[in-house]
Image (cartoon, grey):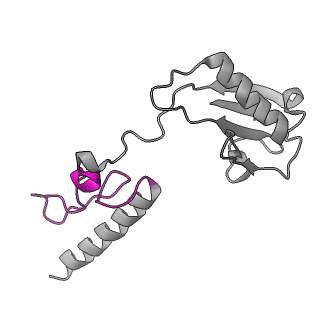
Amino acid sequence: MPDLGLASLPRPDVLFALGVDRPLFSVHSAAVRLAPEGAALVHTMRYLEPGEKPDRHRLIAELEEFMDLTQPGWREQERARQFLPAMPAISSIPLAATGDTNGRPGVVVQNGEGLFICGDWVGSAGLLSDAAALSGRSAGEAAVAFAQR
């Protein structure tokens, strides 16, 4: 996945693009300050197939082609680049054969009276942000119940 530092966005009206057959493009600096005023930090990525070995040259060419579609003229604005060819998006996928999400810890810490945890790896529901939100809510509710007894 190349992260691209651009002096400016050729098409400032295009901040996100996603296709079922194409990589992802996102201007994260549009939502938070990740680049100097007027500049942009752009993330492009493509998920690898299970077992696929990243081919640096092919991936970069594919992602650059996608940038050409979404931000024509970006090459003249490029000031920095970082390529991370195999960043994990999730450490494991819950499978029915391995107990789904039931193997994750609950929000109540056993032998830790009044201690509760939450996160994207906690609780029996959801993945990533929804698991974090659900376990956060459950931990809060458990803390209130603990305080009221």
The C terminus appears in which quarter of the rendering?
Answer: bottom left
Q: Is residue 100 magenta?
A: yes
Q: Is residue 136 above or below residue 45?
A: below
106 in relation to 32, above or below: below
Residue displayed at 74% across by 51% down: 30
Position of 130 with respect to 98 (left or right) is right
Question: Quick check: can you spot residue 121?
Answer: yes
- State the predominant SS element of the stretch in magenta: loop
Q: Nearer the viewer, residue 49 or 136?
A: 49
Q: Quadrant of residue 66?
A: top right
Would you identify the image quadrant in which residue 59 lies?
top right
Which residue corresponds to the image point at 57% horizontal and 25% vertical from the top-left?
85
Residue at 24% over, 72% down: 142
Q: Is residue 79 above or below residue 139?
A: above
Tell me the quarter of the image containing the N terminus. Answer: top right
Q: Residue at x 20, y 82 (%)?
A: 148
Residue 125 picture quarter: bottom left
Q: How many marks?
A: 0
Q: Residue furthest left?
A: 111
Q: How far across and down, in percent of the image, does residue 3 sit?
A: 67, 32
Residue closest to the eye, 31 or 24: 24
User: Residue 70: percent from the left, percent from the top?
Assistant: 82, 42
Q: Which residues are magenta?
A: 99-128
Q: Residue furthest bottom?
A: 148
Image location of residue 121, percent across then percent down: 33, 51
